[in-house]
Image (cartoon, grey):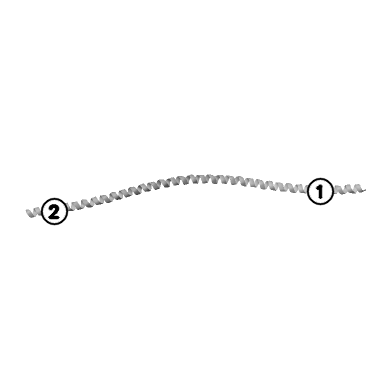
Amino acid sequence: ALESLQASLDVEVKARTEAARVKKKMESDVNELEVQVDQLNKNNTELMKTVKKMQQQIKELQVQLEEEARVQEELREEQTLLERRCTLLVTEGEESRAALEAAERVRKSLETELHETAEKYNTLDSQ
């Protein structure tokens, strides 16, 4: 009976020792998990800050892109107007050149006519 009691006591001591070891191991695991959760929460907080910064940068870049697109459209319109103006100026220049050439032909014709008339007058005057 004493041996049986001793064996039961040994089994109980072993069980308690094992239970204490398992409890200590579980507490250690829980502590490690809590540290990991804290670290993950910190990482998550940092990531959320980064996400917010990036969202703000995206908004700013979108505004900048819209502004650049607007400016580009204005420049495109201005270029079209300048091209039209250049075309008109070229046309006006060609018309002016043609008018000048016509005036020059008329001037030469009138000079010739004047010269001929002067010769006739001189011929008539000298008779």
State the residue at coordinates (66%, 46%). Answer: 89
Outermost residue, left direction?
A: 1
Tag of residue 11: 2
Q: Secondary structure at mark 2?
A: helix
Whole-percent x and y of residue 57? 44, 47
Neighbours of disc 2 within 10 Å: few (<14), some (14-19), many (20+): few
The image quadrant that residue 2 belongs to is: bottom left
Q: Secondary structure at mark 1?
A: helix
State the residue at coordinates (16%, 51%). Answer: 16
Q: Of the two numbered discs 2 and 1 on the same chain, state the one appearing first in sequence.
A: 2
Between the C-alphas of marks 2 and 1, the distance is 143 Å
State the residue at coordinates (39%, 46%). Answer: 49
Q: Nearer the viewer, residue 89 or 25?
A: 25
Q: Nearer the viewer, residue 58 or 49?
A: 49
Outermost residue, right direction?
A: 127
Whole-percent x and y of residue 8? 11, 53
Tag of residue 21: none
State the residue at coordinates (22%, 51%). Answer: 24
Whole-percent x and y of residue 65? 49, 46
**In the image: residue 13, left or right of residue 125:** left
**In the image: residue 26, left or right of residue 115:** left
The mark total stands at 2
Q: Amino acid at mark 2?
A: Val
Q: Amino acid at mark 1?
A: Glu
Q: Do labels 2 and 1 touch, CB within 8 Å?
A: no
**In the image: residue 92, left or right of residue 27:** right
Residue underneath mark 1: 111
**In the image: residue 6, left or right of residue 75:** left
